[in-house]
Image (cartoon, grey):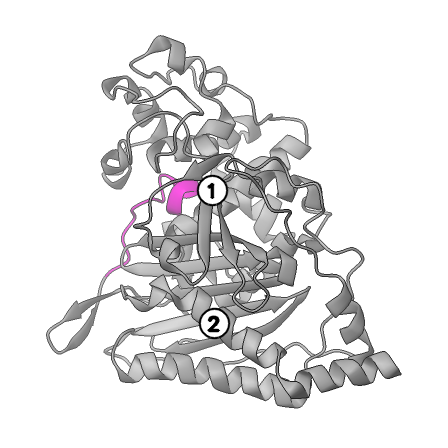
Amino acid sequence: MRNILAIAAPSMLLVTMLFSLAFVEQPDLPEKEQATLFPQPQPPEIYLPDLTKQRLVDSIQAYFNQALEQHQIVGAAVAIVKCDSIIYSGGFGNRNASLKDTVNAQTIFRIGSVSKGFAGILTGIHVEEGVLDWKDKIIDHIPNFKLANKTNTNKVTLSNVLSHTTGLPYHSFTNLVEDGLSLTTIAGRFNEVYPIQEPGSVYNYQNAVFALSGEIIERIAGKPLKEVIQNKIFDPLHMSTASASYEALQESDNVALPHQRIRRGWRALPINKKYYNAVAAGGINASATDMGKWMKFLLGNNPDVLMPSTIEDVFNPKIQVGGRRNYYQRWPGYEASYYGMGWRVHKFNDENTDALNTIIHHGGGVNNYRSEIAIYPNEDLGICVLFNSPNTMAKDCIPKIHKIIQEIMDSPDYNFLKDTLVAL
């Protein structure tokens, strides 16, 4: 196990605590947020006193060690970001259950549909550069794209694709993605599926049509999407272990293998190639350390990569997500969910303040990996958890880790330090 805790001068704590802003409460389909998500300016790093730091380490370790002792998981990696600092990054358990090798903060996992958040941001980068627009028609970039209804074919936009509002039935042609067909081939077959609604009017989660956002970027850039992501996101953010291909994962010597539960424990599985033909939908690989860097960026700390205002566009809700069956809809205080551009946007009542809290979130599952990421804009906080086995723990690890952090930050010792700094 490896833990990385960022420490800086105590004098920066007060500044950090003052710059925490929240989303404005929204109606059923919220208007774009008027208040900025991202505090400006930000201190170089957040200071955690030794006692607080150790409590965080001990609490996170206890949470995951219990899961390991109960054989709920094989391995996991965690990153926690506060303001512009990675305050926790570490690993637990094993990369391969039969070898007993250790997961650390640099161990690489497949992140599944958490990749969709990268697709939304990557599209935002190209929008900011002026080579794409959220309202661009898919057919203008991919001429063989066809729906059964010609009128709807001419209406589907890049925004519809990224927000799952194309009007297609749930998971249309996900099977073709998993069978390894090219996106160009799949794009020409959507006329076999009759849309259930007009574009923009209904939410239905997709993989195949969502991945067309990546196909468009490939055509605009004239190079494979894995190279575009490397150049536009991974390299500028110094995400040194992150990649978007099967080959890159095979070349690494620190990879958590996926696992399947068997009668007496766990069995390691081979890494498959599913979704590397649809990177935007689920083809990214990364470690906890790099997901920490990613969350720092999502909190608005790298305007040279993408301006916070454009990140807000990506996070801005486009459609409400109904129902009450999804696992995140059972989190404490749940009120409502929406979908932005590759991101879920949830509203929760804070049990301590009764204020409405906004969480930017996504989960992912591919090849028996599970992943969860959540950004709390009003707390300037990010949490990411990566697993290399299917498990029930993933469904509520975000609110449970968030509660651990809240309890530590609300502790008398931590508040005493804040009060002391105010008096200086």
Above-or-below relation of 119 to 98: above
Specify which label sits upstream in the sequence, 2 or 1: 1
Q: Position of residue 190 (x, y in %)?
A: 29, 22
Q: Position of residue 234 (x, y in %)?
A: 57, 52
Task: Name the one closer to the observer, 1 or 344.
Answer: 344
Q: Residue at x 34, y 56 (%)?
A: 327
Q: Position of residue 151 (x, y in %)?
A: 39, 9
Structural crowding at the residue carrying mark 2, measured as other residues with C-alpha within 10 Å and reported as few (<14), some (14–19) or many (≥20):
many
Which amino acid does the dot numbered 1 rest on?
Tyr
Q: Secondary structure at mark 2?
A: helix
Q: Secondary structure at mark 1?
A: strand
Residue 1 visible at all: no
Looking at the rendering, the stretch of residues picked out in magenta corresponds to 270-283
Q: Does 259 sit left or right of 248 as displayed?
A: left
Q: Residue at x 65, y 52 (%)?
A: 236
Quadrant assignment, res 168: top left
Q: Position of residue 342 (x, y in %)?
A: 48, 42
Structural crowding at the residue carrying mark 1, measured as other residues with C-alpha within 10 Å and reported as few (<14), some (14–19) or many (≥20):
many
Above-or-below relation of 137 to 87: above
Q: Label 2 to label 1, Cα distance in Å?
A: 23 Å
Which residue position holds label 1?
338
Q: Does 274 lie within the magenta span?
A: yes
Q: Residue at x 42, y 22 (%)?
A: 199
Q: Does 421 lie within the magenta span?
A: no
Marks 2,1: beta carbons within 8 A: no
Which residue position holds label 2?
401
The quadrant in which the C terminus is found is: bottom right
Quadrant assignment, res 256: bottom left
Residue furthest toward the left? Answer: 263
Which amino acid does the dot numbered 2 rest on?
Ile
Above-or-below relation of 36 to 8: above
